[in-house]
Image (cartoon, coloured by chain):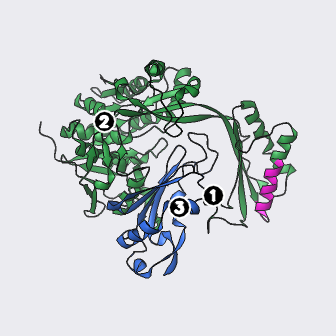
Chain colours: A blue, B green
């Protein structure tokens, strides 16, 4: 096991309008996807993003693209043009999720490229 | 006429405010059949309604007319059709401006089609009288609560009216609110003769449209491994090579910057995706988990296997309403002790306003210390306890315009009556601006009536 940030094994794209943001997390390899499906639960994401999102977290899975898609239901400081936050559209929420540090098995790391997707 | 075996459809404008170089280079630097452009954000239509109420010749995206002025000769020479939601709430005024541009260039026979029916603001009460509540999809509240302050109401139209406009020979199709993927699906329906119950094909076109709807976000923009993207300055915008069987290739013009590979395309497929098995649209529901993506040479990704389902009986409606006022401003505070001094500045502003009788509740006031960690609070690496400088951003909001406006004049005095090292006050006093609330709702399809009309220069 080695302690790494999720950016070592995944990529991300985020943003949305309204009250909540959409955070898509892409595994860099099939091994990384299998690991993330078990490890990265709604509760884990909710705890990591607690200072960004005060609402519920919903997770969807898309096996064909090795994506876990998270909806952070209250993370933009108000819908429409009401938000006063710098990141009113959640553009940086993907990178925030990639900062999460965790122990990842070495065989998963060995099967996962450091750049792009396998 | 037999359908073409391949049609090139590009997106040159991902949002209102995107670079004009995207569409200009798509038209100039390679083969293309259709150029699609998105000019409408969620609250744009409300701004356009206001502009139109002050001047009946306004209320559409004027940037689009400037673009057409620049590309029209090449567009006509290469026979590139253009589809844009630039009509806003006044598509006929936009059409008139385009016909003027054609006249200026000495071009006759330019056909501009106008798609209408999305703007239901004038019919809102009639529709509500039939029992439609326009419940807020986020909160469940009925529209009655804010009906008096509604400033725009637009239905997301599908792709079939766009196809009808192209069937009528249009060179430019102008719409108001429609789905972004519909701009791309419309020409596919027109070229390949897809029908309203060809759900797999309609899903394929919807997925293709979703992949390109944010322009360069599909070709290496806003990409996790940004260091690996070549020549981002000259980034190429995405092009779909569409085929009659619904399979398609995402690519870009040769020689442009950026990259198209499975990873850059997947980044965009995730964007605003929601439930990947059930992506809702007016023409179909698309299953994003059904597609296979494969690299097909340099800067080419093949996408196939899309599955679709019938659409629901309802259409999404985008409603905006007056939700009060807000004002915000910023100052830069340098070190030493930048953060401590910025926090003192914040405290001073609230204290002076309270002294003068203006107190703002926890939900009405806001402050951020940019540089200390505003994007990724509460996580390792997301904060910096001793930044060399901090940008203090402060703001207030609420229903009372006068109270919101009282805030701005207390920010700049910190330069002389606060701690040392406060600067960066350019831009003048923050003033109250309107908060436009966004009210997403559903409406039954039976209330919709669309019209397509074609005009010629």
Tell whether B397 sits left or right of B175. Answer: right
Q: Is residue B376 visible?
A: yes
Screen quadrant of the C terminus of chain A: bottom left
Query: Dot 3: what SS?
Result: helix
Provide the residue designation for mark 2.
B159
Is residue B427 visible from the viewing direction of this image?
A: no
Q: Is B343 contained in the magenta span?
A: yes
Pointer 2 local density, CA inside 10 Å: few below 14, some 14–19, many at least 20: many
Q: Is residue B212 above or below residue B372?
A: above
Q: Number of numbered discs present?
A: 3
Real-space Cα separation, disc 2 to disc 3, in angstroms: 39 Å
Helix, strand or loop for disc 2: loop
Q: Residue at x 40, y 48 (%)?
A: B22
Q: Is residue A44 left or right of residue B104?
A: right
Q: Quadrant of residue B312?
A: top left
| Depth order, front residue of B139/B355 | B139
Q: Residue at x 47, y 29 (%)?
A: B134
Chain letter for mark 3: A
Residue B149 location in percent, x, y? 59, 25
Magenta-tinted stretch:
B334-348
Spot occupied by residue B408 in the image (x, y as percentages of width and height): 75, 40
**Which residue is labeled 1 in the image?**
A51
Extreme left residue here?
B2
Residue that numbered label 3 is attached to: A43
Work out whether disc 3 and disc 1 sit on a shared chain.
yes
């Amino acid at each position: 096991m080695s302690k790494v940030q999720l950016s070592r094994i995944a990529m991300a794209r985020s943003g949305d309008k309204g009250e909540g943001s959409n955070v898509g997390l892409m595994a860099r390899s099939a091994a990384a996807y299998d690991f993330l499906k078990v490890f990265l639960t709604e509760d884990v994401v909710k705890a990591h993003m607690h200072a960004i999102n005060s609402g519920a977290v919903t997770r969807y899975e898309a096996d064909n693209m090795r994506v876990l898609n998270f909806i952070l239901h209250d993370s933009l400081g108000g819908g429409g043009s009401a938000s006063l936050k710098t990141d009113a559209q959640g553009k940086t929420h993907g990178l925030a999720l990639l900062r999460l540090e965790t122990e990842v098995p070495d065989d998963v790391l060995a099967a996962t490229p450091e750049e792009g997707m396998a | 006429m037999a359908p073409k075996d391949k049609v090139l459809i590009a997106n040159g404008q991902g949002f209102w405010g995107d670079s004009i170089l995207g569409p200009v280079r798509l038209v100039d630097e390679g083969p293309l059949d259709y150029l699609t452009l998105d000019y409408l954000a969620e609250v744009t239509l409300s701004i356009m309604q206001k502009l139109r109420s002050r001047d009946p010749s306004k209320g559409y995206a004027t940037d689009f007319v400037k673009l057409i002025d620049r590309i029209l000769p090449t567009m006509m020479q290469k026979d590139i059709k253009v589809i844009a939601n630039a009509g806003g709430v006044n598509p006929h005024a936009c059409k008139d401006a385009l016909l003027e541009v054609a006249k200026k260039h000495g071009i006759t026979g330019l056909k501009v089609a106008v798609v209408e029916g999305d703007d239901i603001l004038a019919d809102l009460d009639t529709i509500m009288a039939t029992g439609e509540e326009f419940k807020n999809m986020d909160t469940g509240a009925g529209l009655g609560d804010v009906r008096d302050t509604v400033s725009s109401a637009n239905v997301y139209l599908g792709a079939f009216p766009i196809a009808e406009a192209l069937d009528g020979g249009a060179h430019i199709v102008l719409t108001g609110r429609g789905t972004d993927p519909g701009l791309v699906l419309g020409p596919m329906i027109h070229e390949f003769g897809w029908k309203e119950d060809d759900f797999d094909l309609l899903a394929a076109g919807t997925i293709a449209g979703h992949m390109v709807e944010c322009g360069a976000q599909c070709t290496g923009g806003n990409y996790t491994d940004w260091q690996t993207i070549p020549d981002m300055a000259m980034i190429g915008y995405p092009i779909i090579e569409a085929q009659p069987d619904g399979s398609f290739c995402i690519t870009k013009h040769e020689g442009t910057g950026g990259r198209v590979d499975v990873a850059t395309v997947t980044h965009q497929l995730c964007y605003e995706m929601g439930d990947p098995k059930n992506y809702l649209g007016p023409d179909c529901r698309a299953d994003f988990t059904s597609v296979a993506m494969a690299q097909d040479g340099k800067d080419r990704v093949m996408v196939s296997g899309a599955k679709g389902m019938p659409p629901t009986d309802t259409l999404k409606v985008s409603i905006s309403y007056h939700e009060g006022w807000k004002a915000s401003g910023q100052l830069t505070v340098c070190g030493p002790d930048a953060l401590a001094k910025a926090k003192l500045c914040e405290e001073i502003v609230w204290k002076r306003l309270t002294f003068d009788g203006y107190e703002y509740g926890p939900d009405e006031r806001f402050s951020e210390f940019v540089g200390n960690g505003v994007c990724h609070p509460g996580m390792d690496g997301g904060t910096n306890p001793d930044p060399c400088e901090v940008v203090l951003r402060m703001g207030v909001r609420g229903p009372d315009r006068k109270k919101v406006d009282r805030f701005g004049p207390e920010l700049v005095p910190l330069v002389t009556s606060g701690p040392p090292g406060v600067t960066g006050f350019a831009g003048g006093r923050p003033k109250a601006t309107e908060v436009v609330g966004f009210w997403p709702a559903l409406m039954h399809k039976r209330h919709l009536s669309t019209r397509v009309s074609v005009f010629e220069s």
